Amino acid sequence: QQLPRSLPKRRHDTLPSDNEPQLKRARLTRTNLALFDKMVKDFNPSARHSAGSALGKSTVVSSSRTMSTTMSGFALQAEKNGILDPSSSKPPANLHNIHERYDRSRRTASPTESAYEDYINRVERAVNETTMIYEVGGKLLKEYPDKRYTRAFNQAFTDFPKDVGFNNCLSAPQPDFIEGLEAREYRPMPVDEHISGAVLYKDNPRSITLPHLAGEWKGRGKDMDEARLQSAFDGAALVYSRNQALSYIGKSDPPGHAEITTFTTDGTTLNLFAHFAAPSKDGILEYHQFRIKSTNLIDTHQGHKNGRR
C-alpha cells in the first residue's frame, strides 16, 4: 500500500546521488580490506561508522516482534522496506557480462546421460525439502578444494544488524544455502567491528563473511514464489553487506552493477537472480532482484547440462 502523498517519505539506507562522482568498481578482497585497515591507526572509532555514514542513515525501527519469511505480512513489509520483486526490478547494468559468465563452457566434464537419468530419479523420489537439498544439492553445487571457502545450510544470520532499512521489522535472513570465505581470512582486520553485516554468525571465528551467493530450495510441488521472496530477502542482505564493505574501503560499485547472485530450485526448475541496490526517483534505496535465467533441469539432457554449467 502506498502512503498518502501528504505524509513525509520514509528514507531507507541511501546511496550517493547522481551528481556525486562515481568510483570505479573495486574488487572486494582480503588484501583491499587489510590495506585500508592499516591506514586507520589504532582503529580510529570514527572509521567504524564510515560505512554507515557514506550510505546514509536509515530510519531506525525498534520492534520486539519480527516477521519471518513464512509469516503472513512478510511480503508487504519487505515491499515497504524497498525490496522489489522481479517484475518491478530493473536489469543490472552489467547484465551482458553476467550472461557471458554463465554461458561459458564448463571446465569439467558435462553430466552424462546416466547421470542425468539418476538426477531425475532422485528428484522424483525426494519426499520433502530436506531430502531435496541432500539429494539434489550434491548434484548442483560445486565443491572447492580451498578449505578457507565454506558453506552453511539453513543457518540464520545471528550477527546481522537489525532494522537497517531493508530488514525493518523482519527476522534475520536464513537461506537454505550460502557460501563464502571465513572471517579469519580477513585478518588482521576485525571485520566484525568495522563493517556492518559482514560477519553472518555471532561468536564464530569461522563465520561465513561477505558472501556473494545464496540459495533457496523447495520440495516438489511446493511454493516457488515463496522461495523467490526468500531469495529476494537473502540477496538484499548480501547487497547491504557488500555496499557497507566497499564504502569502508572508500569504493563503490558503478550504478546498477550487480555482483550478488541467488538461486531458487525445486529440483525441476533452476532460477538465477542478480541483486543490486539503487535509489528511486524519490531518493529511497531499493533492492532489485532481476531474473537472469530459468532452466528446466529434467526435460532434456541438454537442458540439464545447461543448468549445471
Image: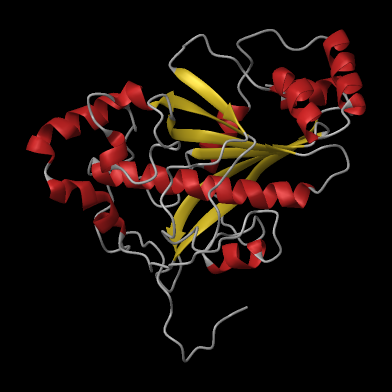
In the image, 204 versus 212, the foreground residue is 204
Query: At 74% across and 28% down in the image, what residue appears?
Result: 133
Left or right of 283: which side holds 36?
left
Position of the N terminus, as image quadrant, is bottom right
Query: Which quadrant is home to the C terminus?
Result: top right
Q: Is residue 42 in sight in this rendering?
A: yes
Tell me: residue 186, above or below residue 175: above
Q: Horizontally, is 138 left or right of 178 in the view?
A: right
- Residue toward you, 177 or 309: 177
Asked whether, in this view, residue 125 is left or right of residue 160, the answer is: right
In the displayed structure, 112 sits above or below 155; it is above
Residue 128 relative to residue 16: left or right? right
Question: In the rendered image of this protein, does residue 33 appear above or below residue 232?
Answer: above
Q: What is the residue that sits farthest to the left in this orientation? A: 41
x, y percentage for residue 60? 38, 67
- At which x and y percent is residue 178? 56, 32
Give how far across and how far down residue 253 sits, in percent.
Answer: 36, 45
Q: Is residue 93 visible?
A: no
For the view shown, which residue lies furthest in the bottom direction?
6
Q: Is residue 268 above or below residue 85?
A: above
x then y, percent, for residue 160: 43, 46
Q: Tell me the colour scheme of the image.
A: secondary structure
Q: Residue at x 46, y 88 (%)?
A: 7
